[in-house]
């Protein structure tokens, strides 16, 4: 275990950190308002969310290093919010069907003195044209529950025609940026 706190309860982020031998000493979810501000650009929004999650947890653990992250999907310059039910998820799948979209993941580290550093990772994904049967089957799987749009490490992987960027970033934590940020504040 490394001497930092992960401001996320995501099992995917925990698994990714373990993959690079960067398991946090503590995991604490940040319960914050995640609504975009009026006119806020997707890249600004996701960076703000990563920072606010890290800052929320850092306020409770002064003098500790905190890592926060946020992932969003962007299609046609619109932020795709997490679906609350099957009907909303079907709409998301229809929106993404046959189109390219971007997955933006921001990572923020706050050091012991409260100074923050943020990195943004962008991955472009091309989805195949989805049949109604594929949409219904994916929605019925409920893999997407709790995720923004979908879970790439599940069944949806077979529906992606092309990915340009970071697979780990799409899962929820771009490992290259994360490792570099943690090492920049002394976590090795």
Image (cartoon, rainbow, N blue to C red):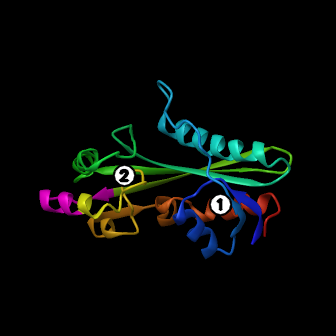
**Residue tagged 1:** 178
From mark 2 to mark 1, how far is it between C-alphas?
22 Å
Is 141 displayed left or right of 42 in the figure? left
Q: Position of residue 1 (x, y in %)?
A: 75, 72
Evaluate whether residue 20 shows in this view: yes
Eyeballing the image, is 86 above or below 52? below
* Residue at x-position 27% and y-position 65%: 159
User: Does residue 110 appear left or right of residue 102 in this picture?
Assistant: right
Q: Vertical placement of 83 versus 150: above or below?
A: above
Quadrant in the picture for residue 51: top right
Sequence order check, earlier mark of 2 and 1 = 2
Residue in view at x 86 percent, y 50 percent: 63
* Residue 59 horizontal/vertical position (percent): 76, 42
Q: Which mark is residue 149?
A: 2
The reply to whether residue 129 is in sight is: no
Q: Label 2: how many residues lie within 10 Å, few (<14), some (14-19) or many (20+)? A: many
Quarter of the image with the C terminus is: bottom right
- Does dot 1 land on a helix, a strand or a loop? helix
| Residue 57: in magenta span | no
SS of the residue at dot 2? loop
Magenta stretch: give its range.
126-137
Farthest residue in the top direction? 38
> What is the tally of numbered marks visible in this picture?
2
- Residue 98 percent across, percent down from the top left: 22, 54
């Amino acid at each position: 275990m490394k001497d930092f706190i992960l401001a996320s309860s995501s099992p995917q982020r925990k698994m990714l950190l373990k993959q690079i031998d960067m398991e946090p000493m503590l995991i604490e979810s940040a319960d914050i308002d995640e609504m975009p501000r009026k006119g806020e650009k997707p890249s600004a929004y996701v960076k703000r969310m990563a920072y606010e999650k890290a800052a929320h947890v850092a306020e409770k653990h002064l003098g500790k290093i905190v890592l926060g992250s946020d992932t969003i999907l962007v299609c046609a310059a619109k932020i795709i919010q997490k679906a609350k039910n099957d009907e909303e998820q079907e709409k998301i799948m229809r929106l993404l069907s046959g189109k390219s979209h971007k997955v933006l993941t921001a990572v923020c580290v706050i050091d012991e003195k409260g100074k923050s550093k943020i990195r943004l990772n962008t991955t472009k994904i091309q989805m195949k044209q989805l049949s109604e049967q594929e949409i219904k089957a994916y929605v019925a799987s409920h893999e997407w529950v709790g995720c923004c749009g979908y879970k790439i490490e599940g069944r949806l992987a077979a529906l992606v025609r092309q990915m340009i960027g970071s697979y780990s970033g799409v899962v929820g934590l771009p490992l290259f940026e994360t490792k570099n940020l943690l090492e920049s504040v002394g976590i090795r």
